[in-house]
Image (cartoon, helix red, strand yellow):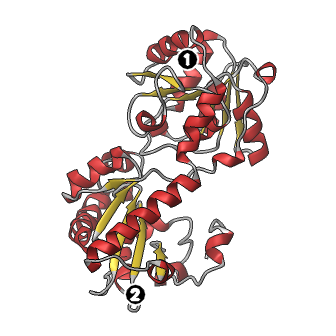
Amino acid sequence: VPDSISAKIRSHRITTSFISKLPKSSKMYQSYLPLMPLALEQLDLRGYDLIISSESGPAKGIIPPPESLHICYCHSPMRYIWNMFHDYRERSGFLTRLMMPVLAHYVRNWDAISANRVDYYVANSKTVASRLQRYYRRESTVIHPPVTVRDFSPVASEEVSDYYLMVGELVAYKRPELAVELFNRTGKKLVVIGGGQMLHQLRAMAQPNVTLLGSQPFDVLKHHYARCRALIFPGEEDFGIVPVEAMASGRPVIAFKRGGATETVVEGRTGVFFDVQSCDAIQNAIVRFEGMTFNTTDIVAHANDFSETVFEKEMRAFIRRALDERAGHSQDLSHSIHQSKNLSSH
């Protein structure tokens, strides 16, 4: 079991597929994608009343027993075979680029077929819900993922600094180069927290007013969230936890108006949007932002709508309704919820 698995999950019985015994499977799991259908279909799930698969890979492809209720909490259909197939292929090595179309075609067909093994889909955002409809022709209920907002808190206004902040993995689709290029041009301070394949490239292009800290421990991240002037969020995410963490710290967000940010950031109340991924568009948003005032209490209150407590309440209510609908009458769900199993692909 990978070290990245949380202590809460480790406290329960964990059953893994044969893929977990293969070399470097925890870090290079995408390399074993062609084996995942076989691995998932071998998992024996007899005896469970409720099965919840958590999916941004192929976890929903298990074969549920006829008497079980299968709910899939979907973070996205597999990006590397669906909406981001060409992006992943473009960034791959020669052999992968050569083999990927054939392998992806095989997995894509299986993925579409196995989508019908799910009784109910829950999407983590409206963006993901639209993909479920497009690729699987399945309806879904949107329940936003839990954010540990209680771990973040605002500071007094006099402690807020003059730097802008960008947080996240530094990879191409998040467009971090836009923020670095813009702040190089304007001379305003930008702090970047996060590692990734673009870190060295961005450090090489950054001017002295742009500081790239790389990956940092939580205390450093929390400190910078609470004291930044605003968070810069130039990429498009399925949901995007980073803007919610910034808002839980009392700070506004300047975000690209696509994807999950449109469901978490409120224009004029908790941040501002820009419509195009370009330096000029971000600069115009910053100018508008600097002419506005924001209420820290309102921002934090809005972030609390995405708390773990809210998620648990909504998910339990959904599961209760699903079980009631399946049974055709009201029932005590405590046993059914206890007899649930969370699945991963490896």
Across and down, in percent, residue 183 comes to 61, 17
Residue depicted at 41% across the width and 70% down the height: 53
Q: Judge the density around disc 2: few (<14), some (14-19), many (≥20) Cα neighbours within 10 Å.
A: some
Q: Looking at the image, which is closer to me, 321 or 57?
A: 321
Name the residue that disc number 1 marks: 182
The answer to whether residue 177 shows anywhere in this view is: yes
Name the residue that disc number 2 marks: 45
Residue depicted at 47% across the width and 72% down the height: 344
Across and down, in percent, residue 148 comes to 63, 51
- Seen from this angle, which residue lies furthest front? 330
Three-letter amino acid code at the position of disc 1: Leu
Q: Is residue 149 left or right of residue 74?
A: right
SS label for mark 1: helix
Q: Is residue 4 left or right of residue 333?
A: right
Three-letter amino acid code at the position of disc 2: Leu
The answer to whether residue 61 shows anywhere in this view is: no
